[in-house]
Image (cartoon, rainbow, N blue to C red):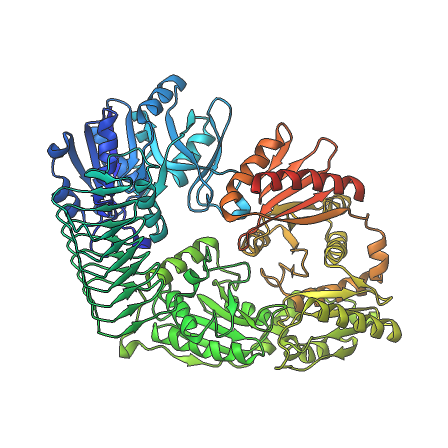
Amino acid sequence: MKAVVMAGGEGTRLRPMTANQPKPLLPLVNRPIMEHVLRLLKRHGFTETVVTVQFLAALIRNYFGDGDELGMALSYATEEIPLGTAGSVRNAGEALRDDPFLVISGDALTDIDLTDMVRFHRRSGALVTIGLKRVPNPLEFGIIIVDDEGRVRRFLEKPTWGQVFSDTVNTGIYVMEPEVLDHVAPGEVVDWSADVFPRLLADGAPLFGYVADCYWEDVGTHESYLRAQADMLSGQVGIDLGGFEVSPGVWVAEGAEVDAEAVLKGPLYIGDYAKVEAGVELREYTVLGSNVVVKEGAFLHRAIVHDNVFVAPSTSLRGCVIGKNTDIMAGARVEEGAVVGDECVIEAEAYVSSGVKVYPFKTIEAGAVVNTSVIWESRGQRSLFGPRGVSGLVNVEITPELAVRLASAYATTLKKGTTVVAGRDVSRAARTLKRAVISALTAGAIDVLDLEVTPLTVARFETGRADCVGGIYIRTTLGDPQGVDILFLDADGADLSQAARRRLERVFGRQEYRRAFPGEIAELTYPPRVVETYTRDLLRRVDISGVREAGLKIVLDSAGGTASLVLPNLLGKLGVEVLTRNNGLDEANPTETLAERMRDLERLGSLVSSSRAAFGVRFDPVGERISLVDENGEPVGDDRALLVMLDLVAAERRTGRVALPVTTTRVAERVCRFHGVQVEWTSTSQDVLTRAAAHPEVIFAGDGRGGFLMPEFSGTVDGIAAFIRLVGLVARTRLTLSRIDRRIPEAHLLRRSVPTPWAAKGGVMRHVVEAAGGRTVDTTDGVRVVEDDGRWVLVLPDPAEPVTHLWAEGPDTGSAQDLLEQWATVVERTGT
């Protein structure tokens, strides 16, 4: 059987290590990653191998040649452009037409039993057998569920935490029948997991999964690069390190010289012809490449040092990577997580701080302190984006410097000469950061429409209305006056999709920003009459018939936020009597805590009841979400407010669909069914809900947190539009909010959060699926398990915190509580 080694990847997340060499040639304990793969293939009898190459292909061909030194026969299939995982194999198809073949990545470390995997493939009669492995964090891989016979039942490529339904992931190792190539169009960009496998699964083709009990590490990040070498040194990988184990855990290759006065604390590896002088201390998980020289007094701990590096006296290297042919001069220090590229010079007493990347051929001057303050790595954050965009503490985690880099990355993802909207809330921090953002955007050849202080809803509207490709809005974090959120918008004014976020994160991580030539520096303009345009369109598109005739009295609270910039102009044209609170910009209080919100709702309620108003509305500080108070002055909780709005809209429209997140009570389904309206359940992600609301049949959407979408006006959450829609509905029905609430059945939906370590989340979700047994399982977001009696529980990992959330609903509070406790025990038992 032949093998195909895919070796065309650029390894962009590993830069600067891969800035001038392909990822498969990166050394793991002094051998290229791909060499470890080829040695594995040979051990299992795969001697005839096709290597697919694209990025810096000549370097791979020159290094391995025809494979004779390894006792193998290698040939190469070159891609002129990247063709994807399936396209690259199809490009080598002429050599694979006769017999089954194995596909394996040339840049992952594994000791998988390929012989047993091939045996499984033949026994199962599969068209494709996918190598699977259980991992703690499945986010960066394709996750797969197989049945008891190993047949693939479901898979999803690179999920979010809300989409995780297993910790069993695709390793990129396949055994395939040659007929599978007929499903790949030649010369086109095609991926196995994203394109081919879904089609085959839908057609009922026999796809099987081989769950391997082996070591497997996708060496895709600097952290995993260090981890793989530590695992090799500690004996967790079944491979031959080469060299001699001169003492427990201390490996020394041929020709190396180690002074007897050097301190060696293994496991560690010293490459061939390296030299370690007296007084040197080499600590755990250090790897020295070939011909490395380490002078007296140097200290190295968890340092990966590539070939031909000179390490001068009294230097300190901790948890870093040093590229080949680099000189580290006397007294220099390179700290945890730093990466120094090939052929650099770090001069005497220089300090390279944690997380810094030094690209090839650079010189760091003597005594220089290189500190780019890579906040996201220092925080250990798994993703640049959180549920509120890019968030952090003002001038600690979110600085003007970081804002410039973020905006530069965003500009790099956009076409030169296009236009972006910029807006902010009332805070001084947002003003300062917006100025930094605008400078970076215009320097990246992106024109900017500056809306200055404006509601987020207006910024979203203007982005979608004007000829813009996106937008940036900066606001104070809700409930935290020390925090700030930077929101990135797409061309429709909605939050960026997951794919767009990942693209921005890749550019930000590489720090390869586009700069405009002097003649390309973009323009900054201040568009006129934006609020007036928003108001006019809102009143034209949202039904306000009957409002003037109803003679409604309403109490509004703007929370000292930006909604106060729109409401006066809007209310003057609406024809209702209005009492207002906090109807002015409050720069000193740009956000509200939960306690402040509840206090102000109580005061709003008192004003509503004493004035005999129809209802009261409180806007959040950026006008995006609303809270309701009924005619009796009683606050209407966010979950009940969603049902009230839903009932009113559905009763009036009597047709169409509504989009709701899966965390919503199923009472909503009963309300919709009564009015002849269907429910489309979505994930809790804001961008997914927004996309669902864009369907022409959708008449309403809400997130259960005070956010409502009115598709007739906007495809994004808009508190001001929701208020106008509510006014029209109440005016036409002449119903009070309390009466509407009373006619809706009571919901018994409970919620609980369980602390869950990051490393345990994937296992938790797999055990939840297993514990579900024969019950109905819904994986729209997280895992929702439906009992035979209709009760249900939803288990959903938090995307930003080490927590798993649970929702449970039943016919009464007691049964919901029992169900919640039952499944919380499953999560706790697995996650500890």
Above or below 61: residue 522: below
Which sits in the foreground, 812 or 723? 812
Residue 425 visible? The answer is: yes
Residue ranking furthest to the top: 123
- The quadrant in which residue 781 appears is top right
The residue positioned farthest toward the front in the image shown: 261
Residue 744 spot, x, y in % from top left: 81, 50
Q: Left or right? Give the position of 703 relative to 461.
A: right
Res 52 → quadrant: top left
Q: Position of residue 705 (x, y in %)?
A: 67, 59
Q: Is residue 417 above or below residue 52?
A: below
The answer to whether residue 96 is seen in the rendering is no
Residue 352 lies, in percent from the top left, at 30, 67
Quarter of the image with the C terminus is top right
Q: Is residue 553 left or right of residue 395?
A: right
- Residue nearer the viewer, 573 or 453: 453
What x and y, as percent, mark residue 636? 78, 61
Q: Is residue 169 above or below residue 437?
A: above
Q: Quadrant of the N terminus?
A: top left
Identify the residue at horizontal 75%, vertical 53% (top origin): 643
Task: Judge whether 273 appears above or below 830 on screen.
Answer: below
Location of residue 438 (image quadrant)? bottom left
Foreground pick, 543 / 102: 102
Residue at 84% in and 68% down? 633
Number of numbered discs present? 0
